[in-house]
């Protein structure tokens, strides 16, 4: 906080001479889930990456000596390295040069590290550890962006999410004493404001959405890609499920208890096959990438 089939997200064009590989990736794809097909590296030569700023951080979290390293993108803004072993790309490193933010993703285990590197390569805080981050990720797909803590004191914590070009897109304000969480789209206004850590905001969402037309139809939940995993995690019955959101980006299900109250929440991000299951009384119980 995770296994999936690697597919090509962007076209990789082989450069002549030094054997470097340059990638033109889909800007809409979450960089932590962007995948590289090993066939696209055909003919490329593994590179020595020890001189790079992020190498010490990468080596701390991954035994780099076990892999072949390929630089698939290196420009004024960021550098992307993939590590290959057993003819498979298994690890991806993204280093944002302007902010020294480093992210490491294992394509089977998920996110290994995300933080700001200092001169001594000290690790920064893992945003996933913050109580408000799950709520932030649920509402704006925070994994698509670079998260930065811009203020953190005894009263409140402010996180800014930046896009691939370094532009601030979302702002999260969390008041520690009250658990009040506010999420603001810096271009579109307020997205969420409420007290987290309770079921109130989820219950309200379910009440609003259960009346929608799709919930009146006979839905074949078993056909959903995430259903088998959900059933494995919570042993759910289709009769207990309610579809509360289903669009091009994600699908959200609620599993109800015997009293008809929301007990579990399932969030499936379609582009990345990320599946999250939340026990609404005890917290997150699964977060991973489905095959």
Image: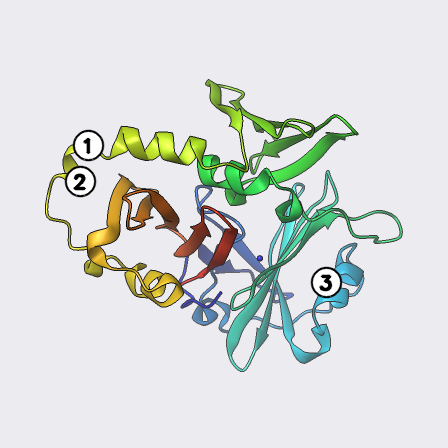
| Mark 2 element type | helix
Q: Mark 2: few, some, or many residues within 10 Å (few <14, many ≥20)?
A: some
Against 36, residue 281 (above or below) is above
Q: Which residue is mark 1?
A: 212
Give how far apart the Cα atoms at labels 1 and 2 are.
6 Å
Q: Position of residue 105 (x, y in %)?
A: 59, 60
The C terminus is located in which quarter? bottom left
Q: Which residue is mark 2?
A: 215
Q: Nearer the viewer, mark 1 or mark 3?
A: 1
Against 204, residue 48 (above or below) is below
Query: What residue lies at 68% left-to-right and 69% top-to-bottom?
Result: 47
Q: Can you name the residue that lies furthest to the bottom here?
A: 86
| Residue 157 shows up from this direction | yes
Query: What residue lies at 51% left-to-right and 50% top-to-bottom?
Result: 282
Q: Position of residue 13 (x, y in %)?
A: 48, 58
Snapshot quadrant of residue 207? top left
Q: Position of residue 32 (x, y in %)?
A: 54, 52
Q: Position of residue 138 (x, y in %)?
A: 46, 40
Query: In screen coordinates, is 67 left or right of 250?
Result: right
| Mark 3 element type | helix
Q: Which mark is residue 58?
A: 3
Q: Of the two numbered discs 3 and 2 on the same chain, state the one appearing first in sequence.
A: 3
| Residue 291 shows up from this direction | no
| Mark 1 element type | loop
Q: Of the two numbered discs 1 and 3 on the same chain, state the one appearing first in sequence.
A: 3
């Amino acid at each position: 906080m995770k296994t999936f089939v690697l597919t090509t997200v962007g076209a990789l064009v082989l450069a002549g001479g030094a054997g470097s590989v340059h990638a033109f990736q889909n800007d809409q794809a979450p960089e932590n889930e962007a995948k590289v097909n090993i066939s696209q590296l055909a003919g490329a030569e593994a590179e020595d990456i020890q001189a790079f700023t992020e190498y010490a951080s990468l080596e701390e979290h991954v035994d780099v000596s076990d892999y072949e390293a390929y630089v698939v993108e290196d420009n004024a803004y960021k550098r992307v390295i993939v590590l290959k072993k057993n003819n498979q790309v298994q690890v991806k490193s993204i280093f944002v040069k302007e902010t020294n933010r480093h992210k490491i993703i294992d394509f089977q285990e998920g996110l290994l590290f995300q933080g700001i590197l200092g001169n001594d390569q000290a690790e920064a805080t893992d945003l996933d550890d913050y109580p408000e981050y799950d709520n932030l990720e649920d509402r704006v797909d925070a994994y698509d962006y670079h998260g930065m803590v811009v203020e953190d004191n005894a009263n409140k914590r402010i996180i800014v999410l930046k896009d691939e070009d370094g532009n601030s897109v979302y702002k999260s304000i969390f008041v520690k004493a009250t658990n009040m969480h506010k999420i603001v789209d810096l271009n579109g206004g307020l997205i969420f404001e409420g007290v987290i850590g309770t079921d109130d905001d989820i219950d309200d969402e379910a009440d609003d959405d259960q009346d929608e037309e799709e919930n009146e139809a006979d839905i074949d939940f078993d056909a959903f890609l995430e259903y088998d995993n959900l059933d494995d995690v919570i042993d759910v019955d289709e009769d207990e499920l309610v579809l509360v959101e289903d669009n091009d980006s994600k699908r959200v299900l609620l599993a109800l208890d015997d009293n008809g109250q929301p007990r579990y929440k399932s969030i499936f991000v379609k582009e990345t096959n990320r599946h999250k299951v939340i026990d609404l009384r005890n917290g997150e119980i699964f977060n991973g990438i489905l095959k």
